[in-house]
Image (cartoon, helix red, strand yellow):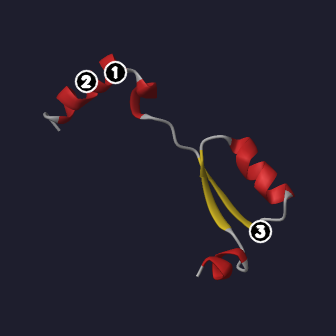
Amino acid sequence: MINKLFSTDLKVINMGLRDFSKNLSEAGCKKVIDLDWRPPAGGNKKMLKILSELKKFA
């Protein structure tokens, strides 16, 4: 099974650093998708708590 993995073309979804997908493309990876994802509220714990409280009213 592991041999099959290394003999097929990579298909990558990149979440985050755009340079990572750029490096993969330059290395020959033909299928790279960039997903512009960021943690909710920028990862700020106080803002996350406020958002979770607001969701109760939605």
Residue closest to the eye, 48 or 20: 20
Q: Where is residue 2 in the image (x, y as percent from the top left)?
A: 62, 76
Residue closest to the eye, 18 or 6: 6
Residue 29 as seen in the image, left or right of residue 46? right
Check the image and report above or below for 22 versus 33. above
Q: Quadrant of the C terminus?
A: top left
> CA–CA distance between discs 2 and 1?
6 Å
Q: Mark 3 points at which residue?
A: 30
> CA–CA distance between discs 2 and 3?
40 Å
**Residues at badges 2 and 1 in contact (C-beta under 8 Å)?**
yes
The residue located at (84%, 59%) in the rendering is 27
Residue 45 is marked as 1
Residue 44 as seen in the image, left or right of residue 25? left
Check the image and report above or below for 11 versus 8. above
* SS of the residue under disc 3: loop
Check the image and report above or below for 48 versus 26. above
Q: Position of residue 11 (x, y in %)?
A: 65, 68
Q: How crowded is mark 2: few (under 14 residues within 10 Å), some or many (20 or more)?
A: few
Q: Name the residue under label 2.
A: 49
Q: Position of residue 3 (x, y in %)?
A: 67, 80
Check the image and report above or below for 5 versus 40. below
Kind of residue at badge 2 = Lys
The quarter of the displayed image where residue 45 is located: top left
* SS of the residue under disc 2: helix
**Residues at badges 3 and 1 in contact (C-beta under 8 Å)?**
no
Give whichever of discs 3 and 1 has the lower sequence position. Answer: 3
Residue closest to the eye, 53 or 10: 10
Residue 37 as seen in the image, left or right of residue 11? left
Kind of residue at badge 3 = Lys
* SS of the residue under disc 1: helix
